[in-house]
Amino acid sequence: MKPVLGVSQLQLRPLLIVSELLLIAALAFMASQRQLTLVLFVPLGIGLVLTFLRWPSLGLIIASLAGMVVPFYGPSGLNVTMILIALLLGLWLLDMMARQHQIQLAPSRTVWPLLSFLVVAVFSFGLGQLPWLTFALHAPLGAQLGGLAILVLSAGIFLLVANQVQDLRWLSRITWAFLALGAMSVLVRSLLPALGLSMQNLFQQVGPVFYIWLVAMAFSQALFNRDLHLGWRLILGGLVLVTIYILFVMKFADKSGWLSVFVCIAAIIVARSWRAGLALVPVGVLAALYMWTRIIATDDYSISTRFDAWSIMAQIIKISPVWGLGFANYYWYTPFFPIRGYAVSFNSHNNYVDIVAQTGLVGLVCLLWLWWELGQLGWRLRNQAPAGFAQAYVYGALGGLAGMVVAGMLGDWVLPFFYNVGLYGFRSSMLGWLFLGGLVSVEQMVMKQKVSAALK
């Protein structure tokens, strides 16, 4: 029997080779260029899936950085960041169900408000299919799904980091990779063009959340990570100063950027020392009075129209104040409520107003509950996390959280509205959810250390 088996194998090999050659020839002759491109991407996709299954934290690094450099845009602004996070989420859920036979989440108090927010969002999405206004059109289903996807994927990246990053080394790699590429982005997109060297196409546009977390992590590591070489700490401090210069001097009109970053830095200083925070109070008050006069002088129309928009949004929200009108729908209702005599579609330019309009007061309560739990967690961990990178990370997360809270008041930067910042803006907004998930990751590491110490 053995010789027969050996002969059959020898006979099959040339047949397989010939078959493969014929298949390749048929594809080359019959398939379009687009189909051939897709075929070539299949091995790459399989390789990514296998890599992410083996090293999920590596997938998080790729997902967080890809949006800065990959110029891919699908329908309605669908981007590579959203695709990669959806893939990572699917693989994680598949692993829990197929291999672990259970869905187990990190035992953190922050998980409950996040899951509650998700449940409310799905319920509001369903209610969004109801005819709230007789003569008004609904947002297209694609727009509603896009709005829901932004929230789901934001919560998803938070949970992925909180549950899959169980080693401080991987959290450190995610952070340093972001700081390295972020520094390159700032240099290439802002400083080099100022010197007459146009290289902006190398990096994609970023929003305020990107700058918030770039400054938060660089500032906290430079200030509190005593394990880091002095030279690197000085470089990080220089990165903070350069970023502030870009935001405050070169991009002063974009108030969402520099104001959120200043709040971020102030929050880190106050979390470290309340005495230093008290010293900042008179400086902050004087700076606020001075800046307010400048802002009023330059942006009086923008500010007044925002207040007009919020007043109209209050009337629209009254239609369904508890559960909201569903995702993206209010944008189609605004023409029925003219603003300054114009019957046009507009958005609120405020994340909290958007959340109430789309998921109701219940959704807003869930988000504020999440902010509260994250703030409390960071406040506790600042004295419990190991000295060095972990402790500096906690301070950075507290500052980043404060910056995001303020950024949400100045625009839809934290959870982009489909018809404004949109899916495109998710590439930057997801960074906040990623690093806040890292705060829960630090919490789980501290808890494991306590359990190990108690068992010894």
Image: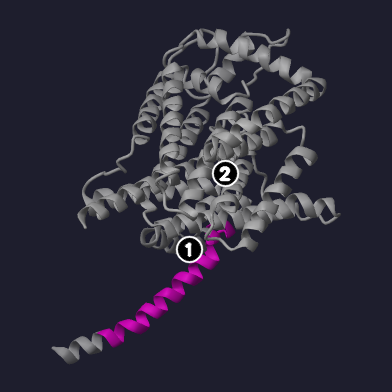
> Identity of the amino acid at label 2?
Arg
Name the outermost residue toward the right.
196
Q: Quadrant of the C terminus?
A: bottom left
Q: State the residue in front, 369 or 124.
A: 369
Q: Is residue 114 above or below residue 438?
A: above
In the image, is residue 362 part of the stretch drawn in magenta? no
Residue 368 visible within the image: yes
Q: Which residue is mark 1?
A: 44
Q: Is residue 428 left or right of residue 61?
A: right
Q: Give how far apart the Cα atoms at labels 1 and 2 are.
A: 22 Å
* Crowding at mark 1 (Cα within 10 Å: few <14, some 14-19, many 20+): few
* Quadrant hosting residue 425: top right
Specify which label sits upstream in the sequence, 1 or 2.
1
Up-down relation of residue 43 to residue 68 (above or below): below
390 vs 175, nearest the viewer: 390
Q: Residues within 10 Å of mark 2 (few under 14, many from 20)?
A: many
Which residue is farthest left? 1
Which colour scheme appears in the figure?
A: one colour
Q: Main secondary structure of the magenta part?
A: helix
Q: Is residue 126 left or right of residue 172?
A: left
Is residue 22 located in the magenta-colored stretch of the structure? yes
| Nearer to us: label 1 or label 2 | 2
Q: Which span is picked out in magenta? A: 9-37
Q: Which residue is denoted by mark 2 in the rendering? A: 427
Residue depicted at 49% across the width and 62% down the height: 39
Q: Give the residue at x 68% y 36%.
A: 257
Q: Is residue 4 above or below residue 165?
A: below
Regarding mark 1 in the picture, which secondary structure is present there?
helix
Name which residue type carries label 1: Leu
Q: Classify mark 2: helix, strand or loop.
A: helix
